Amino acid sequence: MWFNGQPLASNSLDRGLQFGDGHFTTLVIRHGRVEFWQRHWLRLQQASSRLAMGIPAQQDVTRVLDDIAQQHPNAVAKIMITRGNSQRGYAPDAATPINWYVTVNPLPSWSAQGIAVAQANLQLAQQAALAGLKTLNRLEQVLLSQERQQRQVDDLICCDTSGNVIEAVSSNLFWFDGHKWRTPRLTLAGIDGVMKQEICAHVLPATVSSLATFTEFASAEQAFLCNTVLGPRPITHINQRPLAKSVLPEVVYTWYSNVLSNSSSSFS
């Protein structure tokens, strides 16, 4: 094997790099505290189970996160798990040990400033076996990020190949249709985000998970995006149409303000 033109002794390579054979979660460390840790750990467990892949011991992972939190009390950490190293061929070897990685980056400041969104041209593939999981196969999101930059919009709303609204480029989506709060059903595509789960469980528990066309979504009275790193962000315009309410729901704003101010040093 050669790397950047230089020969290497090994012919074995991480399957995460070869095939995207792995999954990850991205979490926030704030005030030395790992936010929503139990949901992140459950996400890793569920993904490893559905992909028939091993998982590191939780105490090993939390030990690394503790070390990071001491050095970087406000940071973004990304945990990646792959099926380990192999040579050529898709078929995995069950005896091969997994690899896991943790990276750390600065934590951006939260802004409740509204954003304008447009419908993405690229459509997301439907695959029920992978729907909801945050796998290492993110080429769709790479292309969508390029599209967003080229079109010079704050974010894009992505539909699947059947025309169902699924998510934004890297965020989940909520909208109020005049009667109830809704969020896309993610049985065929999309990522079931940790912050989305928290909001559905504790903030907007009456949210309806449903399939909807972009036309249905575009008639929303109020809408917002959310992910673990950027938090909730209100949508002000959809395809240049201003929304009737261009701020976060008060209950969401209050809840997230409390999340930001929680300074206990622990895994939540």
Image (cartoon, helix red, strand yellow):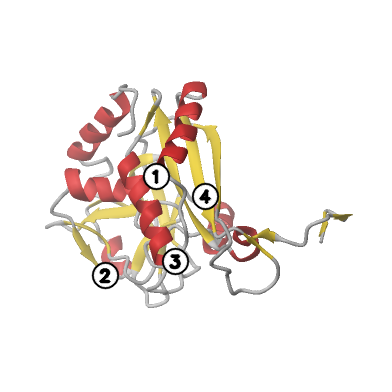
Identify residue for label 1.
115
Q: Could you say which quadrant of the image residue 208 lies in?
A: bottom left
- Given the image, on which type of amino acid does mark 3 rest? Ala
Per the rendering, the mark at residue 52 is 3
Total marks placed? 4
Q: Secondary structure at mark 4?
A: strand
Query: Of the residues under marks 1 and 4, which one precedes in the sequence?
Result: 4
Identify residue for label 2.
211
Q: Using a 10 Å C-alpha cutoff, classify the residue at mark 3 as few (fewer than 14 neighbours), some (14 to 19) or many (20 or more).
A: few
Query: Of the residues under marks 4 and 3, which one precedes in the sequence?
Result: 3
In three-dimensional space, the C-alpha distance between marks 2 and 4, rounded to whole angstroms, equals 30 Å
Q: Residue at x 53, y 58 (%)?
A: 136
In three-dimensional space, the C-alpha distance between marks 1 and 4, rounded to whole angstroms, equals 30 Å
- x and y, in percent, of residue 132 in the image: 37, 62
Q: Is residue 262 above or below residue 12?
A: above
Query: Of the residues under marks 1 and 3, which one precedes in the sequence?
Result: 3
Q: Mark 2 or 4, which is nearer the eye? A: 4
In three-dimensional space, the C-alpha distance between marks 1 and 2, rounded to whole angstroms, equals 23 Å
- Given the image, on which type of amino acid does mark 4 rest? Met
Identify residue for label 4.
80
Q: Secondary structure at mark 2?
A: loop
Q: Using a 10 Å C-alpha cutoff, classify the residue at mark 4 as few (fewer than 14 neighbours), some (14 to 19) or many (20 or more).
A: many
- Given the image, on which type of amino acid does mark 2 rest? Leu
Query: Of the residues under marks 2 and 4, which one precedes in the sequence?
Result: 4
In three-dimensional space, the C-alpha distance between marks 4 and 3, rounded to whole angstroms, equals 15 Å
